Each structure stands twice: as C-alpha cells, then as structure tokens.
Image (spheres, helix red, strand yellow):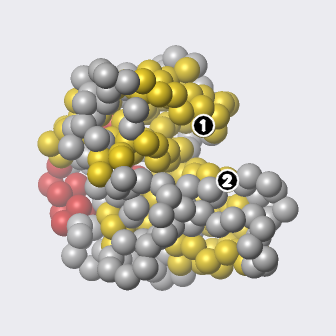
C-alpha cells in the first residue's frame, strides 16, 4: 500500500460520512431494530436457521464505525467452510457452517482483509485501503510481514470510553495507537472520545488485550490474529 495525498483522502472521506450511511453497533450485545443502527450481537448456534443474513460495513473512518452506503459490493465473505459474495450495499446471505465458533473473514479489492467472531455481530466492518494507507503513513507505523492488526472499540452500554490503555500479549511489533482528532491523527497515551485502540502489527496467532482504566483492569483473551488482516474487537471497558 502506498500513501495517498491528504487531499485525496479528505475527498474520499467526504463521500463516506454519516449521510446516507448507517452506524455500526459500538458495544456488543443487544439487538437493534429501527433507526440507522445496524444490528446485532451475532447469531445463536441453535436457532434453527440454515442461513445467516449479514452485511459488510465499509468504513471511511475506523474511529466512528459508520458504514458507507456503497462501495462494499463484490467482496468475498467466509464463515467457517462457507463463502458468499456481497451485493451492492454490502449485504449477503451465507449458509450456516458446522463450526461451533466460526469467524467472519472478508477480503476483496480496495479493502483491508477483516476478521470478526460471529458471536460479535453479523455486520462485519472493513477499512478502505486508501484510508488505512494514510493511517500507516501518518503514524510511521511499523508493520512486519506476516503480521496482523487489531482495531478494538472499548465501550460501556454503547458509549465509547476514553482514558483506556491497552497492552497486547504477545508483545506488538508496532506501537499501540489511540483515537485522536482525525483519522490521520492518532495518540499514544490512551483512548479518546471514540474509545478506539489500534495495533497495526501483531504476530499472527492468538492474542489478548489487557485493558486499564486507571481504576480497574480487564483482559480480553483469545483474539484471533491473521496475517495481513485486521481483527475487529468490541469490548466492555474495565
């Protein structure tokens, strides 16, 4: 990925904002219904349905998790041993896999490959490659070949939580970044108003995040990290 000039980035983001889009759930759990919030907290393994309906959410800004109204078409969605292709608005229908705890995987042109546990949501976020290239360029982030990344949203009852720090195990090869004033301004101290933790380079495998609010601690374990893929994590704040 090569860095793009800021003007091109701003032009693209202006077309991927809230207007005409929908807001991705920022805290797992709870079902939706109505409004612009895309549901939900995943699909129970024993609900009897043979198919799952979902949507790929193209992000113009990973801090806000707002879905663009277009641009997520023609992407490949994998769930266990099943695959599907997205339609014009990113929606898809996929056969339910036999796996007990499958992971969504999304790949295709113009996006960074994504991973998300089925238990988290049937709406899978993906980051536009132009946006991600500028994030990497703006931070001078270290990214080792074969590593993956994590973008975690830390929230309580749907509200992002500021002031959270995160430490990854195994140790990240990059710095840990936190949401700042824009998609190309990232901080190195703690989460801002969007509650976002971004780790650009982690060894592929199983990872955990130790979260610290200053007053309490919690650990999010068993996070699957894949090479050249962003794993999204939705976690309750400690």
Looking at the rendered structure, which numbered label has been put on residue 223? 1
Secondary structure found at label 2: strand
Residue 63 placed where, x, y %?
29, 49
Nearer the observer, 103 or 130:
103
What residue is drawn where x is 57% and y is 73%?
A: 54
Nearer the observer, 7 or 56:
56
- Image quadrant for the N terminus? top left
- Image quadrant for the C terminus? top left
Question: Label 1 crowding class (10 Å Cα cut-off): few <14, some 14-19, many 20+?
Answer: some
Q: Find residue 181 and report its image quarter.
A: top left
Q: Is residue 113 visible?
A: no
Looking at the rendered structure, which numbered label has been put on residue 197? none
Secondary structure found at label 1: strand
Question: Label 2 crowding class (10 Å Cα cut-off): few <14, some 14-19, many 20+?
Answer: some
What residue is drawn where x is 53% and y is 44%?
A: 231
Q: Find residue 206 and report its image quarter.
A: top right
> Dots 2 and 1: beta carbons under 8 Å?
no
* 41 lies left or right of 10: right
Q: Find residue 203 and report its image quarter.
A: top right
Q: Earlier in the sequence, mark 2 or mark 1?
A: 2
Outermost residue to the right: 98
Residue under pointer 2: 103
Residue 201 placed where, x, y %?
48, 29
Q: Is residue 236 visible?
A: yes
Nearer the observer, 92 or 70:
92
Nearer the observer, 163 or 66:
163
Residue 169 sits above or below residue 3 on the image:
above
What residue is drawn where x is 49% and y is 69%?
A: 31
Residue 220 placed where, x, y %?
54, 33
Residue 198 sits above or below residue 173 on the image:
below
Residue 232 placed where, x, y %?
49, 47
């Amino acid at each position: 990925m090569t860095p793009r000039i800021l003007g091109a980035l701003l032009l693209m983001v202006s077309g991927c904002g809230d207007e005409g889009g929908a807001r991705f759930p920022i805290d797992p759990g709870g079902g939706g219904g109505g409004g612009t919030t895309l549901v939900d907290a995943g699909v129970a393994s024993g609900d009897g349905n043979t198919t799952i309906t979902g949507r790929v959410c193209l992000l113009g800004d990973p801090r806000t998790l707002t879905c663009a109204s277009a641009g997520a078409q023609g992407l490949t969605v994998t769930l266990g041993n099943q695959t599907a292709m997205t339609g014009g608005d990113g929606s898809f229908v996929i056969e339910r896999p036999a796996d007990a705890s499958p992971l969504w995987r999304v790949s295709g042109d113009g996006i960074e490959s994504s991973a998300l546990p089925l238990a988290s949501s049937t709406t899978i976020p993906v980051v536009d490659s132009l946006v991600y290239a500028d994030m990497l360029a703006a931070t001078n982030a270290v990214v080792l070949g074969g590593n993956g990344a994590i973008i975690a949203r830390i929230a309580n009852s749907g509200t992002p939580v500021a002031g959270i720090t995160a430490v990854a195990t195994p140790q990240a090869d990059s710095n840990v970044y936190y949401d700042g004033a824009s998609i190309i301004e990232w901080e190195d101290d703690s989460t801002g108003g969007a509650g976002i933790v971004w780790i650009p380079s982690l060894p592929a495998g199983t990872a955990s995040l130790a979260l610290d609010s200053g007053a309490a601690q919690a650990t999010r374990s068993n996070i699957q990290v894949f090479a050249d893929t962003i794993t999204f994590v939705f976690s309750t704040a400690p």
